[in-house]
Amino acid sequence: MVVTINPTAVSILPLLVFLVPLVFGGLIFALGRLGKIFRHGLALTGISLTLLIAVMMTVRVLNGEVLTWWGNNFYVDGLSTLMELAASVMGVIVVVYSMKYFGAKTEIEEAHPYTSMTTYYGQILVFLGLMNWTCATNNIIMLYVSLEFTTLATVFLVTFHWNKPALEAGYKYLLLVTVGVVFALLGSVLLYSAATPFLPVSRVLLLTELGTIATKIPSNIVLLAAAFMVVGFGTKAGLVPFHAWLPDAHAEAPAPVSALLSGIVIKVGAYALARTISVFAPHYGTIPLFIAILCSISMIVGMMMAMVQDDLKRMLAYSSVAQIAYVIEGLGMGTYLGIYGGLMHLINHTIIKGLLFLAVGAIIYSAGKRKISELSKVKFKMPLTAFAFFVGVFALSGMPPFNGFVSKFTLFLALGEAKLMWAAIIGIITSLFTLVCFFRAGYKIFWSEKEVHAVGAEAATATEVPAAMWVGMVLLAIAAIVLGVFPQIMHPLLDSATKCVLRILIGG
């Protein structure tokens, strides 16, 4: 297909989209202990302004512009705005949800330097700022640096409860992801060294220049660098066998943080692969095949592990291992349909998994329990939570008319077009496993007729959560339905993002 070259426009927005949340995060750290109004007010103001900036950039990008700053070192196109818009929307929902989720007891524990709500809201804003920096940078080394910073910014969110399991999960997350992403640095250095003879010094580190040298670099260097990047960015994304940190981190973090981890954090690794590996995939047939094999293994292992979990959050965490594989498999094909389907599932999974983690958080908030074996014997009076949970179940399983069906079907078409039908079949089977796994859990939690009063008074008296918590779930559930029935709503932004990847691929 023909890919047009969009005009670039110098704009300060790519700088503001990550500076604004960083500044407000700093203000929360400085002023948050003065009172609840400062923590909540600054958090809501900061994330709302970030969302406004993301919307402004999206409008300009959809009008055909590419926004740059500082000699193209900051570069915001359709792919960047897709990520930043998704992160900002999820950020607003998570901040509002958190205000009721933690409650008065946690709010008064401000003396503790790590589990305080000041630290919590400050870290959320700092993480979103650094994530936006990752998506706005056009420098391959800065991509690595910003990824590492997002890891550091997330650690204290994972360890928020500051107990032994949370500390162990945080340590594992920090160690494995930090070491894993170093491989991406090695791959970046290899590409930098190989590109030096073909590009001016001022452009040799720019991601947008990779397409111009994709066929000039010796194939052995490209394949080695690609392998390093798959390991590095795949660790951040949670692909098998680099996923060991993910189940513990998702399970031990507070539910709203888990929604951010699964909805946004692991997508940053997929974004980095889209900026790098997708550029080389069409020129080297080994790369799409390798990624398809790795992703198929990740799907199978992720869902097999999810099916044997009794802990709801661990079940969701292992399913993220499988679902991110769909995204990376599409991006790794290097074709329009594959990249389009991968990006569509990236957005859909952000919506779905955010919805499911918030629904599980509501169950924990109301019942005080998160094990399926304990919850299955209790009738809950939580209709909105039940609605949200089952919408998430059917959407995640790829059932029509929910949004997961559209993105997965697109990916299966792309795999067929690439003559990788075996990979499409594995993806379909994994979706069926997902349906069985999550519907079984939902049935035990919400529909089981058995009741055992020994499970505790908290579970027996569970009621619907406050509006600040369920409103975000309901909005995400509605989005999952609407985008399944009217997927064309997302087409302009997805088409722009896909063409941005292809434009870099052809050296535009």
Image (cartoon, grey):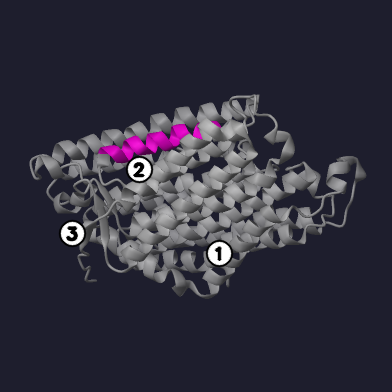
Decide if residue 375 is on the left or right side of residue 209: right
Relative image position of residue 165 (x, y in whole percent) = 63, 28
The residue that mark 1 highlights is: 398
Categorize mark 3 by other alpha carbons within 10 Å: few (<14), some (14-19), many (20+): some
The residue that mark 3 highlights is: 508
- The residue range painted magenta reads 141-156
Extreme-right residue of the structure: 453
Relative image position of residue 118 (x, y in whole percent) = 58, 34
Q: Which of marks 1 and 3 is in front?
A: 3
Quick one: SS at disc 1?
A: loop
Question: Can residue 23 be spotted in the picture?
Answer: yes
The residue that mark 2 highlights is: 230
Categorize mark 2 by other alpha carbons within 10 Å: few (<14), some (14-19), many (20+): many
Q: Nearer the viewer, residue 220 or 349?
A: 349
Kindly report the distance in space between the C-alpha atoms of the residues bearing marks 2 and 1: 26 Å
Give the quarter of the figure containing the C terminus: bottom left
Q: In which quarter of the image is residue 108?
A: top right
Residue 247 among those drawn in magenta: no
Residue 146 among those drawn in magenta: yes
Give the quarter of the figure containing the N terminus: bottom left
Decide if residue 293 is on the left or right side of residue 314: left
Q: Which amino acid does label 3 sit on?
A: Gly
Looking at the image, is mark 1 or mark 3 earlier in the sequence? 1
Looking at the image, is mark 2 or mark 1 earlier in the sequence? 2
Q: Quadrant of residue 20?
A: top left
Marks 1,3: beta carbons within 8 A: no
Q: Nearer the viewer, residue 154 or 394?
A: 154
Kindly report the distance in space between the C-alpha atoms of the residues bearing marks 1 and 3: 35 Å
Q: Nearer the viewer, residue 35 or 210?
A: 35
